[in-house]
Amino acid sequence: MKPPLKIALAGLGTVGAGVVSLLRRNAALLERHAGRKLELVAVSARDRSRERLIDLKGVPWHDDAVAMAALPGVDVVVELIGGSDGVARQVVATALERGKHVVTANKALLAHHGTELARRAEAKGVALGFEAAVAGGIPILKALREGLAANHILRVCGILNGTCNYILSQMRDSGRDFAAVLAEAQNLGYAEADPSFDIDGVDAAHKLALLAAVAFGNVVDFAAVHVEGIRHISALDIAFAQDLGYRIKLLGLARLTQHGIEQRVHPCMVPLSAPLAHVEGVFNAVMVEGDFVGRVTLEGRGAGADPTASAVVADLLDIATSRGAPSFALPAAALQERPVSPMARHCGAFYVRLMVVDRPGVIADITAAFRDEAVSMEQMLQRGRAPGEAVPIVLTTHDTEEAAMMRALDRIKALDTVLEPPRMIRVENL
Ligand SMILES: NC(=O)c1ccc[n+]([C@@H]2O[C@H](COP(=O)([O-])OP(=O)(O)OC[C@H]3O[C@@H](n4cnc5c(N)ncnc54)[C@H](OP(=O)(O)O)[C@@H]3O)[C@@H](O)[C@H]2O)c1
């Protein structure tokens, strides 16, 4: 039998503790699959005295995670500290520099430095595994790199943030507004005390940048992701979505267009006929469309100790058995710098909600604005009547270029019968 794979683990929080538990509980299974033992030989975290409820008997503790990453005799360093820079980056850089394999769940680090780290790993002939960084327990990167490798990928699209999906699902179920549901999610531990990375779409954008790089063979380009969050989604929009046959989801979407690569994270109207519309609560899902395979959807737990550990240890098994494709499916030197397809050129359908004064002529002014910008309306709906008072009007459009839509909304905003800035949500054809 081959000698054990010697693992140093930096970070013993939610995911780190999950990895220790999995390595312990499934040790015999892992040994059978790898043909060798997976042995934890060093751990590091910030506070040695913290009660962790995991079995670390006999595993040497290191106060300095960066020094631990340089230890001779360690084959793989697992980085589960988090953050795009600082200690996490130093741990990964040190491990690669010393010719050690790296496994990480750190999407922020990879979204900012992924291409460079993949280059360094290749130069040293070691692996950089990050399955856990995208959609937690869902093995989407492995599916793209291996099972779907024979396809041109036409698009990827996913529910990549469980916190947002939970909030939107709860808003629909309970009819409550965003702020109330967010506060409840924080009490239940589904949202951080500072939830901005999640609810402003940044976390999903980190994951989308990685997903797009693997799917389309481009360098990781986080700065090129168009990002909008869910703070402005109201209970009213959620109710209208239901009436129109949609669910509102925060999606990450990427595809190649004639203008370059389009990467966007924003709330979407998803038709009820699409599988993604039915992914509820903290679950994640990713739909990939390939030219030969058609659509493939994977759904599962996108976060949490056990699912994320499952992905981390799958990467460890690949390293233990010396199998697996390059980190981003292609050698780092082959990853392409692509032009960014601007949102103004995005073509799709739209949902718009307006708060207007209920009086004759209002609808005619609105439809004239759309006509003047060549935006074709699909349907229009008014809820209730209150002559002289504010009423909501919602409408959906046929496919149109976003720039034209924005010009039409600017015209509508200027009408004195329109009382609030229009709410626009893109409709996604899935
Ligand atoms: N949580 C999830 O469900 C999930 C899912 C997918 C990916 N991820 C990613 O996984 C990574 C870890 O997330 P997490 O939720 O497990 O974080 P966490 O619970 O906050 O744990 C972070 C760990 O890092 C340790 N740490 C902090 N600073 C350190 C330092 N200077 N030196 C050594 N250790 C240090 C902490 O030590 P102490 O314990 O002593 O404070 C803690 O054990 C992040 O990149 C995150 O984005 C998380």
Image (cartoon, rainbow, N blue to C red):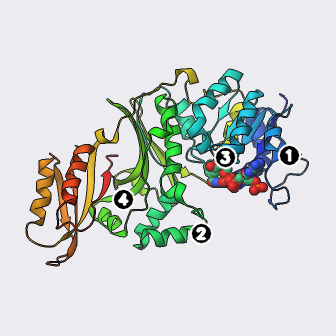
Dot 4, how many residues are within 10 Å of its Cα: few (below 14), some (14-19), or many (20+)? Answer: many
Marks 2 and 4 in Cβ contact (< 8 Å): no
From the image, tell me which residue sits under label 4: 247
Return the x and y of residue 67 as percentages of the image width and height: 83, 39
Q: Nearer the viewer, mark 1 or mark 4?
A: 1
- Dot 1 or dot 4: first in sequence order is 1
Residue at the spot of label 3: 310
| Foreground disc of the pair 3, 2 | 2
Under mark 3, the amino acid is Ser
Chain-order first, disc 3 or disc 1? 1
Ranked by sequence position, the earlier of labels 4 and 3 is: 4
* Relative height, residue 81 to residue 281 (above, below): above
Label number found at residue 188: 2
Tell me how far mark 3 sits from mark 1, CA to CA. 24 Å
Mark 2 vs ligand 1: CB under 8 Å?
A: no
Residue positioned 55% across, 60% down in the render: 195
State the residue at coordinates (91%, 48%).
58
Question: Where residue 119 sits: x, y (%)?
Answer: 62, 25
Please tell me which of labels 2 and 4 falls first in the chain.
Answer: 2
Q: Residues within 10 Å of mark 1 (few under 14, many from 20)?
A: some
Residue 97, quarter of the rendered image: top right
Element class at badge 3 = helix
Residue type (three-letter) at the residue carrying disc 1: His
Q: Mark 1 = which residue?
A: 62
Amino acid carrying label 4: it is Arg
Question: Does residue 83 appear to the left or right of 429 in the view shown?
Answer: right
- Which of the marked residues, 1 or 2, is nearer the chain's N terminus? 1
Q: Nearer the viewer, residue 350 or 172?
A: 350
| Distance between mark 4 and mark 3 Cα atoms | 30 Å
